[in-house]
Amino acid sequence: MSTDNERERDEEAARLPDRLGRERLAAPIKRTGMFGTTTTGDTSGFGRLQVRGSAPVSSQRPFTDPDDPRTADFDRVADDLEAALGDAAGAVERVEVARGEITFHVRREALPDVARILRGDPALRYELCLGVIGVHFPEQEGRELHAVYPFRSITHNSEIRVATTCPDTDRHIPSIVSVYPTNDWHEREVWDFFGIVFDGHPALTRIQMPDDWHGHPQRKDYPLGGIPVEYRGATVPPPDQRRSYT
Amino acid sequence: MTVTEDYIDASGGDWDDVIEKAQATSAERLVVNMGPQHPSTHGVLRLILTLDGETCTEARVAIGYLHTGIEKNMEFRTWTQGTTFVTRMDYLTPLFNETVYCLAVEKLLGVEDRIPDRANVIRVMMMELNRMASHFVAMATFGMELGATTVMTNGFREREMILDIFELVTGLRMNHAYIRPGGVAQDLPPGAVGKVRELLEEMPKRIGTMRKLLDENPVYLARTQDVAYLNLPGCMALGVTGPLLRASGLAYDLRKAKPYCGYQDYEFDVPVSDGGDVYARYRVRIAEMEESLKIIEQCLDKLAPGPVMIEDAKIGWPAKLALGPDGMGNSPDHIAHIMSSSMEALIHHFKLVTEGFRVPAGQVYTAVESAKGELGCYAVSDGGTRPYRVHFRDPSFTHLQSVAAMCEGGTVADVIAAVASIDPVMGGVDR
């Protein structure tokens, strides 16, 4: 038996460079050339350099790392969630374990069910949803807008995150206000700043910006704004037009 | 102003007109705006109240009057510069904002275990002082709103003692940017420990005075007991944490449940009350201040000499500050070193201060128990020198949602008490 396991592990190890290489190439290109120059030619000799962003992390079981106490209950939570989802277990697209935190990436249709299970299942009992956070990744085609939900269980003293995405062309994510009423304002905030429509929200209106505002200010394609400031003869450009090192 | 058969909407317009039109209609309900410019709405909070006589039948909250775009602005500054922004969010708990942000950056960098002990002890001490300062303001403004100006002047006087310490240690009374990724901006200056000891001597008496004023005061009890009741299921559904949750009977405190900055090494109790009303919240807050004093005392005992910034030249801020005759400023020794003796030190200083450090790509969520509840920071890095996205879960933002649950069916006067017991700070709510 053990020899089989060893052979499997060896095969897995042999495939690893190939898998990592393919993942690397699948990652989006973040910049080309050196020093991020756009106005003048790149004379550094690194003109064809392609710097890639991070590939989406997809962790494999076991999620619990015996050396990291922060991950102690991750396998239990993943098992319980899978068991509670039953046939719908495919709703969880991938699981990401990094820095002692676990993120379940779920398909948007399944979000209300997942939320209901997280709150109601006695083995899970995530009593607190700590809101929803929008993130805009314009380069991730088809999944530009992310909505991230941190959950906290007081009963089990556990913390997890659920993330879902929607394409920019169809900005709809089901609301979970009926399960977690606390998300009322949080979903309004994400609508206001990112333009994600939370279907089923009781009154999805702007919350921070004025009601007649155009655009969703925290999207990456929305400019920061600002004016150049003159001080003792020198002009300081607005923050988004200053030299950038990234 | 609109008048219908059903209600009189008195937003905008003259009160004489309202009275005149009210006499002509059979409408019983009056819709009024309280705020955004109202002395008892803790800044620019707008409450839209539907009143039936003295009873508030509907309460709606409008926010956004102090939105400053801090989260968006941070995406255009380095990770270290971010502390100067976050400190301005909830301006009564600046050190909690800074700490939660720095914990997030440190977690992204993977350096949580390398933060020097002394820096952690200083962080805890400053946070506990800040908790007391915030609770004093909560009680002081509450007293003022009920018409008890002695409570107000006492509260602000006590807070001044703490602000004096902040000024000595960080150079500023608020908006400190003192806690930085990797540690704290600078070590405690000479005399700081003595000043904290003075505070530890004096403060129990001051808290005692406050307790004598309020604990059994019949007027105060009448205005606070059984007012703005929110029970535990209500708190859970609305995501309420902090003193409000503990005043509803659940002793949940992140300092105990998920310790950070070494809180597991301190001995303190989590005050709890099951009243669920405004008075219970007051009792929890004042007991928390007494626990804070215990923690500060333990901090002074733990304060061993050592570095206060991570010993990693790629992250640790290169410049040192020094106390000059005109206050805190650049250290002449450091300036002399980079300007006249070491070219490499100058380059290093310049690179780290203007460009900043790179943070590995990824996402984290960190949370601290701020004076008001769970303050969370969700940070995303794309591997660059600037945050890709930072979001703060401000407790006041979440708690203000419970205004309707606390106020509807009560009197107008109780609305004031309810809002004050939440202790919202609009700088944090709107960010």
Image (tube, rainbow, N blue to C red):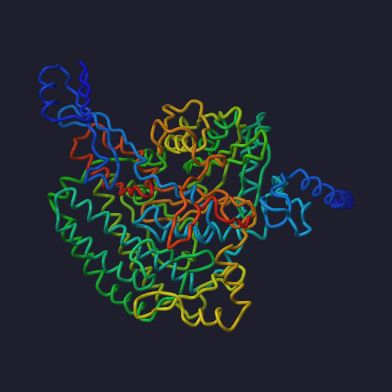
Q: Judge whether B12 appears above or below B418 on screen.
A: above
Most foreground residue, A88 or A50: A50
What x and y, as percent, mark residue A133? Answer: 52, 42
Left or right of B302? Residue B113 is: right
Left or right of A10? Residue A127 is: left
Q: Indicate the quadrant containing the C terminus of chain A: top left, top right, bottom left or bottom right.
A: bottom right
Total marks placed = 0
Most foreground residue, A101 or A119: A101
Q: Judge whether B418 appears above or below B170 on screen.
A: above
Left or right of B67? Residue A3 is: right
User: At 56% from the left edge and 64% from the top edge, which residue is drawn?
Assistant: B354
What x and y, as percent, mark residue B416? Answer: 22, 42
User: At 14% from the left edge and 53% from the top edge, which residue is drawn?
Assistant: B148
Q: Quadrant of residue B31?
A: top left
Most foreground residue, A46 or B356: A46
Q: Judge whether B150 appears above or below B63 on screen.
A: below
- Most extreme residue toward the front, as rendered? A233
Q: Judge whether A85 appears above or below B278 on screen.
A: above
What x and y, as percent, mark residue A95? Answer: 67, 43
User: At 18% from the left edge and 29% from the top edge, which residue is drawn?
Assistant: B13
